[in-house]
Image: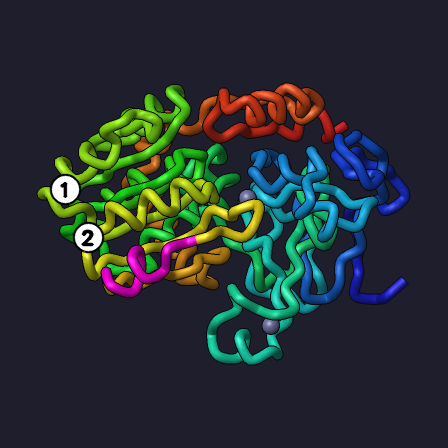
Amino acid sequence: MNKWSRKTIPRRQWVKALRKLEKGPGLSIEDIAVPEIGPHDCLIEIDRAAICGTDLHIYEWDPWSAGRIKPPVTTGHEFMGRIVELGKEVTHLPKGMRVTAEGHIICGYCKYCRTGNGHVCENVKIIGVDREGAFTRYLSMPAANIWPIHEKIDDKYGSIFDPLGNAVHSVRAQDIAGKNVLITGAGSIGLFSIPVAKAFGATKVIVVEPVELKRKLAYECGADLCIDPSSSDAKDQVLQESNGIGPEILIEMSGNQHALRFGLEVLQNGGEAALLGIPSRPVELDVNRLIIFKSITIRGINGRLMFKTWYDSEQFLLKHASEIDPILTHTFPITEFEQGFQLLKDGKAGKISLTLEDFHE
Ligand SMILES: [Zn+2]
Ligand SMILES: [Zn+2]
């Protein structure tokens, strides 16, 4: 035993974890060993987690996850908990502190890391995807990734810093103050983007979303107009709501090629588009008409800025947390995870949280 690891959590015990055991659909609850921690790591006892679209892809074993995931692996990357053990070299964090963490673990030595662009690190490892995730009792995380949860921020928001951060990063990637913003796709990150855009100064937020429940949630989050893309006058409705010439900003959250084309179509000349939604296959675009001659700027959005986005998200939550309450539609014990995944799959939920108490015994 290394002399620095004065262990407080007995390593001989087994704990439960929600894992992908084999290549193929589904997840199962399995016993795993308590993880070891290195000198620069923290051991976190997880209290709450949340289900992400990424977890649903892994659950369903879509082509993306089949190419990326190497079972067996514990899933989950959105979480909050408390520090229960510290590596020997970790001096800036106390045991017992409520924390969440940036789930992208970066190398620190590639060009991107060394120029302050760790969010596009070429050697990134994502928890719950490339290494052990958070749907379990104990998680080992590098201390550099830990984000202390402000004492005025409730546990239920503590577990959603990751997807909220995606929304904050997408909204903050361009100057949106005083501008009209179109959001295509009202999944939970699209929904988070509504109050975030308002908080950072957007004039109007227009949402395009085919699912009625999600349009309803979007209104509850402060959207000015929600449009069903299948209605024949969808484009006219957007133009009418944005001075006849369309919004200045598009935030594409659906990954749907029709939504992307629709968004670029209605964007005003000189507009800017932030793309976070991930299309399942290559998209065909009329680049001349939709981008070049309109002088559109397009940005890909990946992860969260480390850690500027986290500071922005904290500021947002301190003042506006209650505005995202309509999005937090369900909470289940982790043992009832199937129910959560099913609701998400059916488009019948906003953000689904899981409590980990069942795994604490
Ligand atoms: Zn996520
Ligand atoms: Zn790197």
Q: What is the distance, in whole Å, between disc 2 and disc 1 at their CAs?
A: 9 Å
Dominant SS in magenta = helix
> Is 185 left, or right, of 84 in this rendering?
left
Among the two numbered marks 2 and 1 on one chain, the one whose residue lies closer to the N terminus: 1
Query: Please, is residue 116 above or below residue 355 in the view?
Result: below
Residue type at numbered disc 2:
Gln
Q: Amino acid at mark 1?
A: Ser
Q: What residue do we see at 55% from left, 29% from top?
A: 353
Q: Secondary structure at mark 1?
A: loop
State yes or no: discs 2 and 1 in contact (Cβ < 8 Å).
yes
User: Residue at position x 63%, y 48% from top?
Assistant: 83
Instruction: Report the image quarter containing ligand 1.
Output: top right
Q: Nearer the viewer, mark 2 or mark 1?
A: 2
Considering depth in this image, is 323 or 149 the residue closer to the camera? 323
Query: Per the image, is 29 magenta?
Result: no
- Which residue is tagged 2? 268
Residue at 23% x, 43% y: name it: 198
Question: In which quadrant is the C terminus drawn?
Answer: top right
Q: Is residue 112 above or below residue 14?
A: below
Instruction: Compare residues 237 and 169 and report the one nearer the observer.
Output: 237
Residue 310, x across and y down, in percent: 43, 55
69 versus 188 height, above or below: below
**Is the shortest distance between ligand 1 and the CB of mark 1 under 8 Å?**
no
Residue bearing mark 1: 242
Range of magenta residues: 285-294
Q: Residue 90 in the image: state x and y as whole percent.
A: 64, 65
